Every structure is written in structure tokens, then in C-alpha cells.
Amino acid sequence: MTDDPIHAFLGDYAAAVLERDLARFLDLYAQDVQVFDSWDRWHYAGREDWGGMIAAWFDGIRDVRVRVTATEVTTWCDTQVAGGVATLAFTALDAGGEALRAIENRLTVLMRREQDRWRVVHQHSSVPVDFQGRQVVAR
């Protein structure tokens, strides 16, 4: 386990997604979390609202497992607040563990210490979009 709350979050996030464990996933977030996601809606206000989206996502990926890999991670932390950015790759795996497809997005998170643990209070994901073609820019 790392002392860096952002790296710990990224590891726990990846494990919860791989297992499609909604309770574990949502436990990473504060009750008053604000999420600006790349998918479906502009804004999710609160853990319950965010949980509805994640439950639908997990339901939609029942036929695959999704491996989340974080790269280009940059973090900062003080005693009560932590922040970080990363590029996340979401790779769909078949039953044998072979990669079927993958997408990437950028992630920014802010965390706050609540009693004895860290929870996400703000999350923003994004992808660059080409001005001319209005398509996601691939690396």
C-alpha cells in the first residue's frame, strides 16, 4: 500500500472496475463528490448520482472484464487535500484475458481526508476533440 492517496485510489479504482464491485468503487468517493465525466452526462452530483451511472456501466460490461491502467501520473498531497492527474486506459478483456478493445481518457481527481481515509471529492475526465472533424484525437 502506498502513502500517496492518488496512487492508492488509482489501484483501488482499477481493482473495483476489474471485479465490477460497485460497493468498493463507490467507497472511494465522498458523499458530496462532484464528477464531470466524459460519458453520458455533463455532471454527477453526489455519490448516489454517480453510483447510478457506475451501476449502469458495470451492468453493460457483464460480458467482459475491464482492466484499467494509469500512466503519466502526477500527484501532490498535503495533510488534508491531495490531487492528481493521469491518463487511464480501459481495456476490455475476454474470458481468457485477451484484449478485445481499449480506450483512453484523461483524469483529474481531488481528494480530501475524511477521518482516517481519503475520498474523492472532485473528478473530471476528458478526451481531446479535433476542432475540424469533431472526433476524439487519438495518440
Image (tube, rainbow, N blue to C red):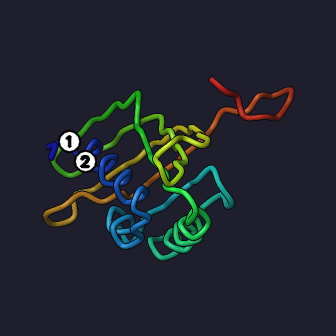
Name of the residue lying farthest toward the front: 96
**Relative to residue 119, is residue 69 depicted above or below?**
above
Q: Tell me the residue that label 2 is attached to.
A: 8
**33 in relation to 68, above or below:** below
Amino acid type, label 1: Asp
28 sits to left or right of 91: left
Where residue 114 sits in the image (x, y, percent)?
Answer: 21, 64
The reply to whether callout 1 and callout 2 are in contact (CB within 8 Å) is yes
Mark 1 surroundings within 10 Å by alpha-carbon count, few (fewer than 14), some (14 through 19), many (20 or more): few
Q: Which residue is mark 1?
A: 4
- Between label 1 and label 2, give the one nearer the viewer: 2
Q: Is residue 9 above or below residue 83?
A: below
Quarter where residue 32 is shown: bottom left
Q: Say which element carries label 1.
A: loop
- Residue 55, image x, y percentages: 53, 72
Residue at 59% in and 40% down: 102
In the image, farthest residue toward the top: 139
Q: Residue shown at 43%/35% (left/top)?
A: 86
Asked whether 44 or 58 is in front, the reply is 58
Question: What amino acid is labelled 2 in the image?
Answer: Ala
Q: Residues within 10 Å of mark 2 (few under 14, many from 20)?
A: some
Residue at horizontal 73 percent and vertical 33 percent from the top = 129
Q: For marks 1 and 2, give the CA distance.
A: 6 Å
Q: Position of residue 54 (x, y in %)?
A: 52, 66
